[in-house]
Amino acid sequence: MSNQLSIQINIQNDTASITLAGVINEDSNFDKIKNLNLKKYIFDFDKINIINSCGIRDWIKYISELNNAEIIYENCPQIIIEQINMVHGFITSKTEITSFYAPYFCDSCDKETKILLKKAEITNNKAPEKKCPTCSDILEFDALEKQYFHFLGQK
Ligand SMILES: [Zn+2]
């Protein structure tokens, strides 16, 4: 597991597609994705393993400097969702979270599994029914729905 942040960026017209991987902490350098002056930023958090409090502070500062650009977060891991729910500024009024992971539990396998959900699958803070990838039994949602989906109502 890498202990550094890796950033891959692909710019097309006014949109940057940015893939983040590794660790967001005090050593993370966002220079590569600063001052681009684009209209839209799509961030893929799928490969982020760790974000610490310094990383959160720096990320919020970075986001606040994007000058009201449209921001999309994709494939947010549970650690990112928990920060979004707790920390003010992680998402702005221009941020849309299109897909994210949520914890589910299989009683038969006695195992937790993270399932990728789309924003559109959640209505009234209800977790959609999902099946265990191993045994196909119905999974139990393994967090407090109202708390975990809080960010969907934030703006
Ligand atoms: Zn199972």
Image (tube, rainbow, N blue to C red):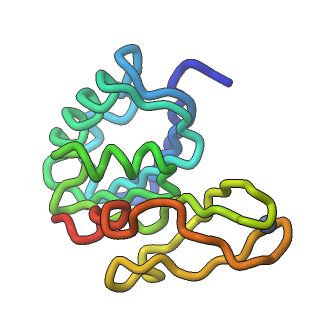
Task: Name the outermost residue toward the bottom.
Answer: 123
Which image quarter has ligand 1?
bottom right
Residue 124 versus residue 29: which sits nearer the camera?
124
Q: Quadrant of the N terminus?
A: top right
Above or below, 128 relative to 20: below
| Left or right of residue 47: residue 65 | left
Count the marks: how many? 0
Figure quadrant of residue 114: bottom right
Q: Note whether residue 10 is visible.
A: no
Residue 144 is situated, as x and y percent measured from the top left of the image, at 39, 63
Above or below, 77 relative to 135: above
Figure quadrant of residue 149: bottom left
Figure quadrant of residue 40: bottom left
Residue 145 is situated, as x and y percent measured from the top left of the image, at 39, 69
**Residue at (64%, 62%) from the top-left corner?**
105
Residue 57 is situated, as x and y percent measured from the top left of the image, at 24, 29
Above or below, 125 relative to 21: below
Residue 135 is situated, as x and y percent measured from the top left of the image, at 85, 71
Q: Note whether residue 138 is visible.
A: yes
Task: Name the outermost residue toward the top.
Answer: 27
**Residue at (41%, 80%) from the top-left corner?**
126
Task: Name the outermost residue toward the right.
Answer: 135
Above or below, 41 relative to 133: above
**Residue at (35%, 54%) from the top-left corner?**
41
**Residue at (16%, 65%) from the top-left corner?**
155
Residue 147 versus residue 78: which sits nearer the camera?
147
